[in-house]
Image (cartoon, coloured by chain):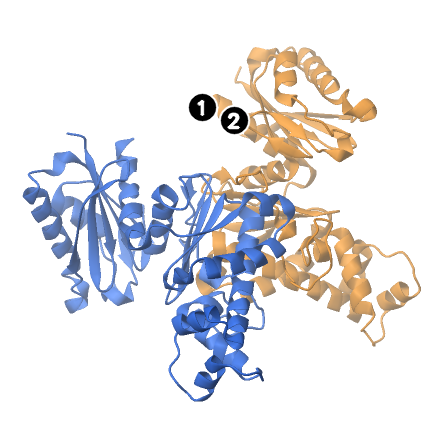
Chain colours: A orange, B blue
Amino acid sequence: MDKKIIGIDLGGTTAKFAILTPEGEIQQKWSIDTNILDDGKHIIPEIIESVNHRIKLYNMNAENFIGIGMGTPGSVDSEAGTVIGAYNLNWTELQYVKKQIEEGTGIKFAIDNDANVAALGERWKGAGENDPDVIFVTLGTGVGGGIVAAGNLIHGVAGAGGEIGHITVDPEGFECTCGKRGCLETVSSATGVVRLARFLAEEYAGDSKLKAMLDNGEEVTSKDIFEMAQADDPFGLMVVDRVCFYLGLACGNLGNTMNPSSIVLGGGVSAAGEFLRSRVEKYFNQFTFPQVQQSTKIKLAELGNEAGVIGAASLALKFAE
Amino acid sequence: MDKKIIGIDLGGTTAKFAILTPEGEIQQKWSIDTNILDDGKHIIPEIIESVNHRIKLYNMNAENFIGIGMGTPGSVDSEAGTVIGAYNLNWTELQYVKKQIEEGTGIKFAIDNDANVAALGERWKGAGENDPDVIFVTLGTGVGGGIVAAGNLIHGVAGAGGEIGHITVDPEGFECTCGKRGCLETVSSATGVVRLARFLAEEYAGDSKLKAMLDNGEEVTSKDIFEMAQADDPFGLMVVDRVCFYLGLACGNLGNTMNPSSIVLGGGVSAAGEFLRSRVEKYFNQFTFPQVQQSTKIKLAELGNEAGVIGAASLALKFAE
C-alpha cells in the first residue's frame, strides 16, 4: 500500500482531520470539537487520541504514513514545532506540539500557522495550480495571508512574513488593533467593510437602503453590504468600490514586488465571488506596471474549507524526500 | 590551488570584473569599456577576450574556476542565459550570452539582472550579513531592487519580481515612465527627488535658498537638495522628509509582507547616509506593526561599487554544489 499523509486544521471551535494520498487526494475526513478548557491542555492529547483511533479503524499503523502536518492559530516556530499566543485555544504559554504528537502517534510531524497552511493548500490543489510563486489573501474576521515565493513559504526573520492584513493602504486611515493606522484589515475584513460603510455613510447624501439601515442603527454585516451592492444599492456599490480600491492597491503592490503567477482571494468576504474579484482586478490593473498586469492573475480561492487540511498535509511531504 | 569564481558587472559604460575566492574575497579586479557599437555585438566577444587574457596572465586556466556569474541590464532569462531589451547596451534583440561565454571561455556561466545581482552582493558580503531574507533597494537614476526570501532570489512568474521602484506610494501621484501613477521611483530616484522638490516649491511660502534656486530656474540635483537639507534649509528638510515618508511607506509594506532581517538602501541617493536612513526608519516604524518594527532593520549598503561583481560571482557558487 502506498503511504499516506495526514492533514490537521486546528481552530478555536473544531479540529479538522484528513487522510490524503501524497498527490493531495482526500481519502478520509473527520473532525472533533476543540476542547479549550484548562488552558487548552486537552487539545493535543485529544488530537493524538483521534488520530490513533482512526488509524486503527482503517486497519493502518504509523508505518503507513509519511507524516502529519498541522495548521494552527498563534505564533509558530516551525523548526522547533512549538506554538505560543494562540488566544482562541487558550494557549498563552509555549506548547511543545511536535514533541507530543510525534511521541503520541509515532509519526513525523510538521506545523505552520493557519494562514500559511491555507496558502499552501490553495497553491497545491486550488487556484494556485502548484506554481512556485503564489500569494493567498484571506478576507475573514481579520485579513491574513501566506506568500509562497520561488517555491518556499515566506516566514521572514521573526515569523511575521505574509501578514498581508497589515499592509498600510491609507497612511491616514483607521486605527488597527496592531497599533498602527490604515492597515488593509481595517477596511477589508468582515468588520472592516462595515466600519468603512459607517464612515462613508456620514458623507453620503443620496438615496440608499443601506445608508438608511446604518443611519437607523440597524445591525449590518459585510455580507449584507455586498448583497445590497449586488442589488444595485448605490451606496452599497460605493462601499464595495472603496473596499476593492484598497484590496487592488495592496494586491498591486504585492504584484509589483513579487510578481506571483496568482494572488488568490479567499475567506468569508470572498464569498462575493466574481463581483468582488473583477473589481479588485480593475484596481490591481491600475496599480501595477504592464509586465505584472500581464503575468499576475487575481483569482478566487477554490478549496474553501478544505484548504487548511490539504495545505497542512502538504507540510508532511518533506518527510518523503 | 582552491578553485575561484569570476564576477562580471556589465554596465552601459564599463564592464567590471573580479576574481574571487568561494568565500567572496576579491583577489583581482579590472574593468574594460563597454563597446555598444553595432547593436552591442562586440560586448560579449570583448568580455570573453578579457577573461581569457586575464586567466592566462595569472597562469590559470578554465579548470581553476568554479564558474562565472554576471549581472546585466535588461530583461534576463536566467534559465536560458539570455538577455533582451538592454537599451543602454543597444541590445534590442535576444542575446545568447550564456552560450557564447561558455563556449568562449570553457567555464560554466550564470546570469541575472544588475539589481538582483547587487542585492545578492549586499546580502552575501555587505549589510545583509548573509541572512536568508534580505531586501535591497537601489536609489539611483531609477529605483530598483532585489528580494532574497527564504534564501532565494525572487524572480516571479515573468521576471518582474523585485521591481521595488514601481510600488505605488501615492495613488494620485506623479506619472511614471511605466505608465502608471505614484510609483516610488517618481519621488525617490535622483530625478524623482528633484521633481518632488519642484512640486512642493509651488506651495512653500517660507524663506529658503533651495526654493529660491528652484524658482530662479537654476539647475538643482538631488545631491544639492540633500546637502541643503543637511545645512538646515527648511524647505530642503521638508523635501527630504517627504522623500523619506514615501521610502518609509514602501519599506514598511515590504517589511509587513516579507519580514526580512534587513532592508538595505543603496545607490547614489543613499550617499546621504545616516541623514537619509534615520528618516526612512522613522516612517518605517510608523508603517509597520510591532513584530516587524522589532525584527526588520533599515540599513545602508556597505559594498558600494563592488556589490555588482561580488553578487554576480555568487551566482557561480551553484556550480560548486
Q: Using the image as rendered, state which of residue B9 and residue A111 is in the foreground.
A: B9
A107 versus A312 height, above or below: above
* Identity of the residue drawn at 52% across and 82% down: B201
* Identity of the residue drawn at 42% across and 59% down: B273
| Residue A64 left/right relative to B43 | right
Residue at numbered disc 2: A317
Chain ID of residue with mark 1: A
Query: Distance between the Cα atoms at labels 2 and 1?
Result: 7 Å
Q: In which quarter of the image is residue B259?
A: top right
Q: Using the image as rendered, state which of residue B288 and residue B150 is in the foreground.
A: B288
Question: Can you give x and y, in whole percent of width and height, for residue A69 in the image?
Answer: 60, 26
Question: Can you give x and y, in whole percent of width and height, for residue B31 in the image?
Answer: 17, 55
Q: What element carries label 1?
A: loop
In which quadrant will I find the N terminus of chain B?
A: top left
Residue at numbered disc 1: A321
Question: Can you give x and y, in whole percent of width and height, for residue B98 in the image?
Answer: 22, 48
